[in-house]
Image (cartoon, rainbow, N blue to C red):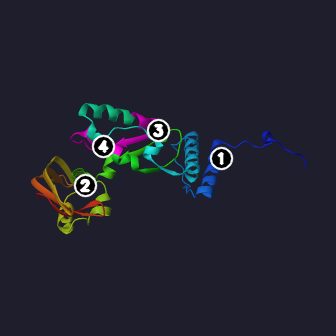
Amino acid sequence: MENRDDEDLPKLTIEQENEFKKLKLSIEHGGIFFNKKNPNIPPEIEGQFLDYVSNFENSFKNSIRITVFEKMGKPAFKIPEMLTDAEITIELDTIIQIMQSFDIALDLICNYADEERLIYTFIVTELFQQEIEDINIDGMVTHFIYEDFHQNHKYDLEVATIDFLKMFLNKKSTFYKDHHSEDAVNEAEINLFRDLFDEFELQLFEISDIAFNEKNALVQFKIEFSAQNEDHRPKISYSGDGSISFEYEFGYWYIKMVHLPI
């Protein structure tokens, strides 16, 4: 039988190469891929993504866990309590630059008083001790979020309140009805009102107070919205004070009671 060189073998198209990469990932790492393809993704981009996933999985399989401090080469740092505010600014900038050089980033969702001292102290006393996989892949950045370590309850309650009211007043989507219509203890009352109308329009929303303890919270707000049916009868306006009470469990705030000026 005549031997054939690789040059004589039929060349795979990019799409065929991608399918081979998916098969390899499935066999070696248990990857799951849906048969439906997205026509908006060029095969070249899909191939680069599959290569990235393969490199990550191989690196992860052979990696060891080390601390952030070790990952950064154990940089010298100064004790926060020994630094003035001006020195904190300089040291924080230095530490952030070192983190960036090792593809490590820290993000903040909220703003805080004396933020530079707070973040510098957090980095050198807490973040440095966090363990991560010792993986080095071009373009890969290890992200940390400050609020994952120190939950900002006020922010979480504000977001939960706004998200619920947006869902409640959005009659164009079934998301509220399918997933959140039974969140509140008084769901029968508020859903009966919601079902009376085909459309809501929010004109004003302003949080007036957020109070919470370890288990319970109350968010009070001023709200103004209109309601209308498809038969174009005159809009009905509702305005006044509202509130949502929450219960804290398993690290999350769950809606307990909803009061609207209805």
**What residue is at 84 percent from the left and 44 percent from the top?**
4
Instruction: Decide: few, some or many residues near mark 4? Use Cα within 10 Å; few <14, some 14-19, many ≥20.
Output: some
Is residue 213 at least partly visible in the picture? yes
Residue beneath disc 2 = 160
Q: Secondary structure at mark 3?
A: loop
Q: Nearer the viewer, mark 2 or mark 1?
A: 2
- Residue 151: x %, y % from top left: 28, 53
Residue beneath disc 1 = 16
Instruction: Decide: few, some or many residues near mark 1? Use Cα within 10 Å; few <14, some 14-19, many ≥20.
Output: few
Work out how far the residue at label 4 is from the one at label 2, CA to CA, in angstroms: 29 Å
Mark 4 touches mark 1? (CB < 8 Å):
no
Q: Quadrant of the C terminus?
A: bottom left
Q: Nearer the viewer, mark 4 or mark 2?
A: 4
Check residue 107 for magenta coloring: yes
**What residue is at 35 percent from the left and 43 percent from the top?**
124
Residue beneath disc 4 = 121
- Residue 246: x %, y % from top left: 20, 61
Give the residues drawn in magenta, as a range. Answer: 97-124
Is residue 234 at least partly visible in the picture? no
Q: Nearer the viewer, mark 4 or mark 1?
A: 4
Q: Please, which residue is most extreme toward the front here?
A: 82
Upstream in sequence: badge 2 or badge 1 = 1
Q: Amino acid at mark 2?
A: Ala
